[in-house]
Image: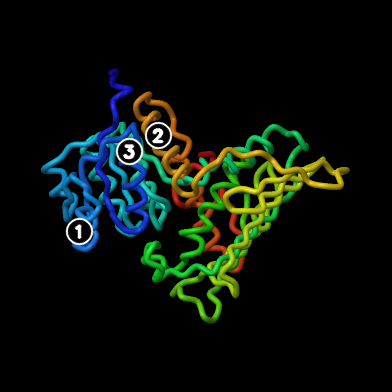
Amino acid sequence: MTEAERPALVLQLGLGARGRKWAEISRSSPHVVPVGYVEPSAEARSWTSAQGFAEPVFPDLPAALRTVSADLALVVTPPEGRAALVTTLLDHGMHVLAEKPLALTLPDALAMVRAAERTGRSLGVVQNFRYMPVNLTLRDMVQSGRYGAPTYATVLYIRNRDGHAPHLNKYPLVMDHPMLLEQSIHHLDLLRFVYGAEVEEVTCTTWNPPGSRYRGDACAAALVRMRGGPMVVYHGTWVSGSDQLEFRWRTDCERGVIIQRDLFGDLVEGAAADTELRPVTLAPAEPFMTDSARLLDDFIDACRRNRPFASSGRDHLQTLALTLACIESGQSGRPVSLSEFSQRWGVDSQG
C-alpha cells in the first residue's frame, strides 16, 4: 500500500448533533481510520460507549494531543472560539477540515487561513452542498452555456426549523444571525460555485418575526449582484407557518430556464419556446451523508496529492465575507460593495 492509498488517521473534535453524523461518515469510510474524539460534554462522551466505539474520547484537545497522533483533524465544534483550536491543530502538523462557518468574524477566519499557509498544512471548510448531485449538475448545465448566459435568478428557502429538536445543534438558538450564518451561507456559497462568479454588491435586510424560536434574526432577504453573472433575488427563513420545507432555485438564461424545485433534487429544464419543462436525471444520494462523505474523500485526496481543494479556507473567505456583508447591509440599510468590504478586512476579493 502506497502512502497515497493508506487510510488517513483522523481526530474528530465535537460530538454534538452534526458531530455524530460525521462520526458515522468517517467510521464507514475506507479512506479513514478514527484515532479518537474530543468532546467536553460527559453525556456526549458516553454516547460513544453506547455506540460501541473503541477509540478514546478526550475531554479537551491538550489531552488528545498528548495521547494520539493524526494526519487530519475534523472540527465539528461551534464556530465561536474555533480559531485557537484550528491553529493548535495546524501547529501540530495536522490538516484540518472544519465545519462552516469557519469563524464568526473575518479576522478570526483570516488568522486560521494564514496559520495553514504558514505551517504548510491544508485547511478545508465543509460546504458540503457543493457535492450534492443536483448542485453539481446545475453548475455543469449553467457553465456549459446550453441556454446561453444566466441573466437573473431567484432562490427561495422557507422552513419552520425547530431548533430544539434533538437531531439539531442548539447553539444557533442564541446566535445573532442564525439564518445567515448557519443556513444562508450554504446558499450564498452555491451562488459562487454554480455561477462561477464572485459578488459585486449585496443589499440585504434581516428580521426576526413574532413566534420565532431564535434569539437572533431568523429571516433574510437579499439582492445579490454578481460580477459578470446574474442578478439574484434571495429569501430564506427558519420561521414559517408551515412545517413543509419549500425550496425553489430558478435560473433564467438567455435562451431557456433551469429550475431546482427541491433542496436535494427535482431539477427541470427547458428552452424558451418549450411548452413543458423536462426533468434532469440525477445520481442518487442521501442528503447530508453522501455529499459530506464525498467532500471528506476529496479533501483527503487533495492533502495527499498536495493539490488545491475547492472548498479551502482561502476560498471560504469569499463566502464568509459575502455573508457578513449581508449582515452589515441589514444593519446600515445600504448596499455593500464586496471589493470594498473585503479590502477593509484584509481579504483578497479575487480569492
Q: Residue furthest top?
A: 2
Q: Amino acid at mark 2?
A: Asp
Q: Is residue 331 visible?
A: no
State the residue at coordinates (41%, 66%): 172
Residue nearest the observer in this picture, 311 or 54: 54
Q: Which residue is mark 2?
A: 297
> What is the three-letter code of the residue carrying label 3?
Ala
Q: Are marks 1 and 3 in contact (CB under 8 Å)?
A: no
- Within 10 Å of disc 3 (Cα), the crowding (few <14, some 14-19, many 20+) is many
Tell me, for residue 91, which label it has, or none.
Answer: none
Coordinates of residue 187 in the picture (x, y in percent): 56, 52
Q: Earlier in the sequence, mark 2 or mark 3?
A: 3
Q: Residue 25 in the image: state x and y as whole percent.
A: 36, 44
Q: Is residue 182 left or right of residue 143?
A: left
Tell me the quarter of the image containing the N terminus: top left
Q: Earlier in the sequence, mark 1 or mark 3?
A: 1
Snapshot quadrant of residue 170: bottom left
Q: Which residue is mark 3?
A: 116
In this view, the residue farthest toward the bottom is: 210
Q: Nearer the viewer, mark 1 or mark 2?
A: 1
Query: Along the horizontal axis of the image, is 218 left or right of 60?
Result: right
Residue depth check, mark 2 versus mark 3: number of the one nearer the observer: 2
Residue denoted by label 1: 46
Q: Is residue 253 left or right of residue 126?
A: right
**162 in relation to 65, above or below:** below
